[in-house]
Amino acid sequence: MTSPLLTRRTVMRGALAAGAFPSAARGQAGRDPANQELTNVKIRITFNDLSMTATLYDNPSARDLITTLPLQLKIEDYGGNEKIVRLPRKLTEDGSGPFGNERPGDLCYFKPWGNLALFYDDYRWDGLIRLGRFDGGIEPLFVRGEYPVRIERI
């Protein structure tokens, strides 16, 4: 038989947890990989005297990317739909999962190899985490070749 004191404590703990749950649920809202919200955090990617900005999503991988900036690396062509930047270390994959609304202008993280993938054409790949979206045009990505690249928070 349960004592009344234990029952009251259990009820009080439950009430406190229920009061905290709605705010905890709101805090998780941006973590669904298919329904992420853009933040006000922006990065600049500069190569070949061209510059682009991207607005990042609120996810653990994008926050981890910010901790690595600024970076001086190399950007190169990969396939016919993207450019890649090989990062110096892998980013966290916490909170990652499939998303189905891929489109040109996405900035992604390729989990298996730890690269940034900058898409300028249609794509579909299960091993990606979407980090953000490019603001404005994506024309600089059409320039073929390999260049030094600087990535910084703005």
Image (cartoon, rainbow, N blue to C red):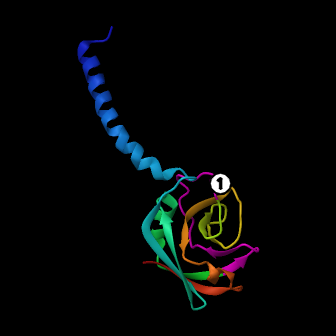
- Where residue 131 appears, as percent x and y from the top left, is 54, 64
Q: Residues within 10 Å of mark 1 (few under 14, many from 20)?
A: few
The number of discs equals: 1
Asked whether, in this view, residue 29 is left or right of residue 139, the answer is: left
- Where residue 63 appears, as percent x and y from the top left, is 46, 63
From this viewpoint, which residue is outermost toward the left?
Answer: 5
From this viewpoint, which residue is outermost toward the right?
Answer: 80
Residue sitting nearer the eye, 100 or 97: 100
Q: Residue at x 38, y 44 (%)?
A: 24
Residue sitting nearer the eye, 91 or 145: 145
Q: Toward which corner of the image does residue 13 lie, by quadrant?
A: top left
Residue under circle 1? 100
- Where residue 7 appears, as percent x and y from the top left, is 28, 17
Residue 87 drawn above or below residue 34: below
- Where residue 134 appears, as percent x and y from the top left, is 55, 72
Q: Quadrant of the image for the C terminus?
A: bottom left
Asked whether, in this view, residue 65 is left or right of residue 125, the answer is: left
> Which amino acid lies under the numbered mark 1 shown in the image of this protein?
Gly
Q: Is residue 87 magenta?
A: yes
- Principal SS element in the magenta part? loop
Q: Quadrant of the image for the N terminus?
A: top left
From this viewpoint, which residue is outermost toward the front?
Answer: 136
Residue sitting nearer the eye, 18 or 133: 133
Asked whether, in this view, residue 89 is left or right of residue 145, the answer is: left
The secondary element bearing badge 1 is classed as: loop
The range drawn in magenta is: 76-101
From this viewpoint, which residue is outermost toward the bottom?
Answer: 49
Residue 111 drawn above or below residue 146: above
Residue 86 drawn above or below residue 22: below
Q: Toward which corner of the image does residue 87 lie, by quadrant?
A: bottom right
Q: Is residue 86 magenta?
A: yes
Q: Residue at x 58, y 53 (%)?
A: 34
